[in-house]
Image (cartoon, coloured by chain):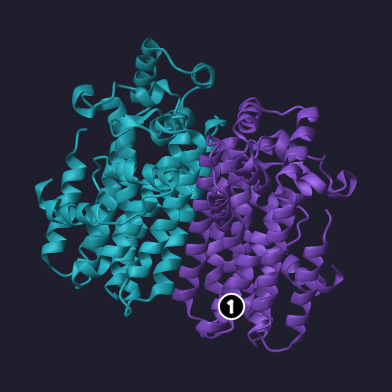
Chain colours: A purple, B cyan
Amino acid sequence: MDFIQPYTSLIESELKNLGLPEKPETLYQPQIYILSSSAKRIRPVLTLLGCGLCGSEIDKAVPAAIAVELVHNFTLIHDDIMDQAESRRGEPTVHVRWNRSTAILSGDGMFVQALLQLQNLSEDVDFKEINREFLIGVNRVCEGQALDMDFEKRLDVTTQEYLDMIGGKTAALISTSLRMGGMAAGASDEMIEYLGILGESLGIAFQIQDDLLDVIADPEKFGKRTGGDISEGKKTFLMVKTLESCTDSEREWLTGLLKRRPVSQSNVHKIIDLYKKYGATDSADALMNEYYSKAVKALDQFGDSDYKRDLQHLIHYLKKRDF
Amino acid sequence: MDFIQPYTSLIESELKNLGLPEKPETLYQPQIYILSSSAKRIRPVLTLLGCGLCGSEIDKAVPAAIAVELVHNFTLIHDDIMDQAESRRGEPTVHVRWNRSTAILSGDGMFVQALLQLQNLSEDVDFKEINREFLIGVNRVCEGQALDMDFEKRLDVTTQEYLDMIGGKTAALISTSLRMGGMAAGASDEMIEYLGILGESLGIAFQIQDDLLDVIADPEKFGKRTGGDISEGKKTFLMVKTLESCTDSEREWLTGLLKRRPVSQSNVHKIIDLYKKYGATDSADALMNEYYSKAVKALDQFGDSDYKRDLQHLIHYLKKRDF
């Protein structure tokens, strides 16, 4: 992704110069730790691009971009506690490296730091508006996480409910990232609306693709073994779609397996066969393409610029990814 | 506390009409639950009084007051997880009533709701300034909580470090509550400064008093048995002061006990004797009075008003409390 490198470099350099206090270490060291792990920085890059798309210098959106990246990392720290995840980006998670209390507290502190970043926006930016946008975005992420937790206990989740869930958990912050970029640029409500549709579509497409890659990707390239989500009993698009479409006896068999996780590798392959039988993989592929097209269409509303070209590249790159 | 009843009624009625969404229940039910338990609402009342002291209608500070109360409850939800507390205000804590993940998430969501409340401030209030004040206050609470966690593992905490810790954990939000009231009133920097000193002093006095009451209060009135903090091995002002002053052999005995909590009731009484021997209870009493006087002196900077009279009452009432 060489074409986004100038943007990620800017973000990395800003993150290195955040100037978090040294003490109390219990509060700040975990924040510094998670920010120093290598990450794609997609969200803050989108904030910069959203600002550029609307005709402004991208520097104007830097505080918003950093806020978005900090809040994303705050949600990762807390999500990893909830999911009891042991590692993230190849490093131990915060609650494993330190402990659960430290992870809760440093996550809270990181959210505060994210919000404080917005104080650095220039005076001509509508601070109250951008603050509201940010908070509503984070609240939607919380709502999505709540739905995801609820779905774990349910076996009758509909595809619409699934889309609502990822609309919050994955797409909301991506949408907010782009919209905040537009707001930093002082763009019109109409342009901000298009940025929102672009982000929402991109986020949903990306998540469905993630669900799909779990089943169809080359495990070596993807970095995870085939059907990892199935083995963990996750309610992915494919699972939800198949549960909706299959026969009662198949549903009984499936739900029986989901209650006794982890699912064995031989059953994982049987489930993948069931996904194919009911066209869940094809449906996912079609829906993913639909959302990517929606994103491209929203992007077409903006005038030509280097930022538009880079964002077109990025969408193309994401759509073609096989890892 | 009849004299603050008009203020608490206003807060309670606003809290009842918050209009939190019904779904997802996993996110909002715990928020509604903790807000409906009976509480003193001291912080939001101070925000209203801070606004009134500066010559404005207290209605202007209502969004700030509600924000302060919501953020206080957010910290309670997360603190209770960290402290593994089973009950709060006579009810099961959120992580006990639901589970830990739900408590982390609903706490996060409650912090978002707190910040969203500030959006309701009227247009003539400096939104960016009050937002910054709020965030810096919450960050100081996080710093105080981090120090408190660090102190648990240390036996060489100084009284100065202890005062820094409660300055964050207890006093910062009380100071911020009053300062935000002044900011909502559009008060001068000088007046806001006095509100901060008033809040900071009140918070520190209140916490030292809490430490003292653990040892000297009538258990029936106080609602906790004598020496509860000692039994849990908490680093109170009395403990820190005594560890600073006692002989090496006494320190060895004390630190030995603190490593093997809970401390037995007979040892609790021996420790209280040690507190008295080294004048820790007298020191605490003197320091508490010093901070209450500082609070009164800061309040004297304001012109006469009903709000000043009510705040004088409140300080007097808090100082005389024996529970």
Q: Position of residue A250 (x, y in %)?
A: 65, 32
Q: Toward the viewer: A274 or A103?
A: A274
Question: What is the quadrant of residue A118 in the picture?
Answer: bottom right
For image coordinates 29% across by 52% down, the residue present is: B43
For image coordinates 70% across by 71% down, the residue present is: A293
Quadrant of the snapshot with the C terminus of chain B: top left
Q: Position of residue B140 (x, y in %)?
A: 47, 53
Residue A283, compared with residue B184, is above or below; it is: above
Q: Position of residue B122 (x, y in %)?
A: 30, 75
Q: Amino acid at mark 1?
A: Tyr
User: According to the image, label 1 marks what residue?
Assistant: A194
Q: Toward the viewer: A315 or B166?
A: A315
Q: What is the secondary structure assignment of the residue under circle 1?
A: helix
Q: Chain of mark 1?
A: A
Question: What is the quadrant of residue B262 in the picture?
Answer: top left
For image coordinates 68% across by 53% down, the residue present is: A32
Q: Toward the viewer: A10 or A238?
A: A238
Question: What is the quadrant of residue B240 in the picture?
Answer: top left
Residue A188, compared with residue B218, is above or below; it is: below
Q: Residue furthest top?
A: B266
**Residue B43 appears in the rendering:** yes
Q: Position of residue A259 (x, y in %)?
A: 61, 27
Q: Is residue B173 left or right of residue B223?
A: right
